[in-house]
Amino acid sequence: MAGDPPPLLRNGGFYRLLSVRLVGSFSDGLLQAGLATFILFSPERQPTPLAIAVAFAILLLPYSLISPFAGVFLDRWRRRQVLLYANWARALVVLGVAGLVFAERDGIDLGITVLVALGIGRFVLAGLSASLPHLVPPEQLVPANSISPTAGSIIFGVGAVAGIGLRGALGGGDSGAALLLCLAAAVYVAAGTLALTLRAGQLGPDGDRPADTVAGIAIGLIDGFRSLLGDRPSWRVVVVVLVYRLGFGVLTVVLLLILRHTLHPESDPDAALADFATVAVAVTAGALCAALITTAIVRRTGARLWTTATMVVAGVVTPVALAQLSLVAMLVGGFLIGLAQQAAKIGADSTLQARIDDDHLGRVFSLFDVGINVALVIGAILVAFTVPADGVSMLGFVLLGLLYLATAAWYWFGERRKPAPAAHRTAP
């Protein structure tokens, strides 16, 4: 009937599953805010480059290492039960994290507990993705896959910002962070409970295809790596993105140190936290701008020229913005860096989708996701052993800019010869 809403908007099962994601994402934001304020922006402790690098590793590596293998178990267990019990288990672990924060424990015991909580979180996200085809027909999967992660990312940001404000309302300091984590645990319980609005077997697995194994996935990832190496334009643009992410890891740690130790008194971590959040908004705005303009620009100039140009911009802007040691310069630089690296990521995704055979595309993207997070952690670790505690290293700023410029030259001149034809794509 004319005027009826699109079918996806009438799909109650999709919205029940989406509610599980959104409530869990809000709690993820609360969790990350509580951890960040305790570890990095607490007046009771002064973060060092190594401590920040370790925090990055704890926050990112579970996502990287667990993601490819989560499907082994999700193909065997009822996914509604996974969403229910994993969220409840995560709530219990986060309560343990809150207890350690309240006791002002910031050693290896906190790191391991946080690792467990985030690992369970990655398992939940994989379960949500695997469940979607059981609620949405094939012709609606593209919009559903656009809505679900985008809305989750937005709500995660809302939760993080809300968490920063709630920490202050709960008394601030370590006790405020601990109470914030208790609130996050309660929201995880709510997310798990929402899964009960779905039928027990509604999310699969159906058992109509053989379940994969850990060994099978490992072999598949190796096969995907070989497929990527077999196409020169694909692996070269992936290298560009990985350089961006390594640089972003460096920039994030340096920014944290400069704001915490140089631009603000060490007794005023809340001001540093507010400025860091402002720069993060600028980076996000740059990424959004890239999403809006990249398609039109690539249509006119080609992906190679646009990607190279953005990396040249990053190479010039990075040392200039950092050397000013001013918030305004960091906001401008953050916007341009966010735009540049998101433009490169869009170009890389498009290149892989166009050139890698569909039978290998999923494995290649799994490797790509792992590489992005590992590169970010490597960048943070490099800072830990090369940058002073206040984050100010003019030589380091220049070297990072030169890395971007050298990569731009390598990418541009290495791709001047006509690439080999793309692999034959099988029909989806």
Image: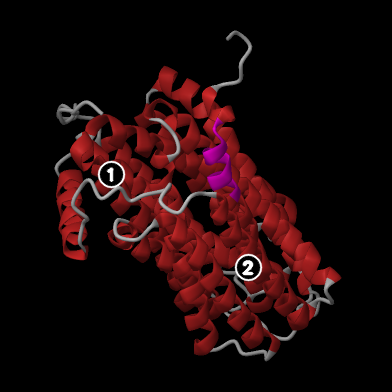
Dot 1: element: helix
Q: Quadrant of residue 356?
A: top left
Q: Say if the magenta span includes residue 15.
A: yes
Q: Which mark is residue 342?
A: none
Question: Which sits in the foreground, 255 or 422?
Answer: 422
Q: Is residue 74 left or right of residue 214?
A: right
Q: Quadrant of residue 52?
A: bottom right
Query: Residue 121, how many percent across, how many down?
Result: 49, 64
Q: Please give the residue where the numbered disc 1 appears in the rendered image.
A: 362
Q: For the residue marked with disc 1, what is the amino acid?
A: Gly
Magenta part mainly helix, strand or loop? helix
Q: Residue at x 76, y 73 (%)?
A: 269
Q: Please give the residue where the numbered disc 2 appears in the rendered image.
A: 31
Q: Residue at x 38, y 62 (%)?
A: 64
Q: Is residue 284 visible?
A: yes
Dot 2: element: helix
Q: Is residue 33 visible?
A: no
Count residues near mark 1 (Cα–Cα under 10 Å), then give few for <14, some for 14-19, many for 20+: some
Q: Earlier in the sequence, mark 1 or mark 2?
A: 2
Q: Residue at x 78, y 70 (%)?
A: 167
Q: For the residue marked with disc 2, what is the amino acid?
A: Leu
Q: Residue at x 59, y 83 (%)?
A: 96
> Which image quadrant: the N terminus?
top right
Decide: marks 1, 2 in contact (CB < 8 A)? no
Query: Residue 2, how many percent across, how many down?
Result: 60, 8
Query: How far separated are the C-alphas under marks 1 and 2?
Result: 30 Å
> Which image quadrant: the C terminus?
top left
Q: State which region is magenta.
A: 11-19
Question: Which sits in the foreground, 415 or 109?
Answer: 109
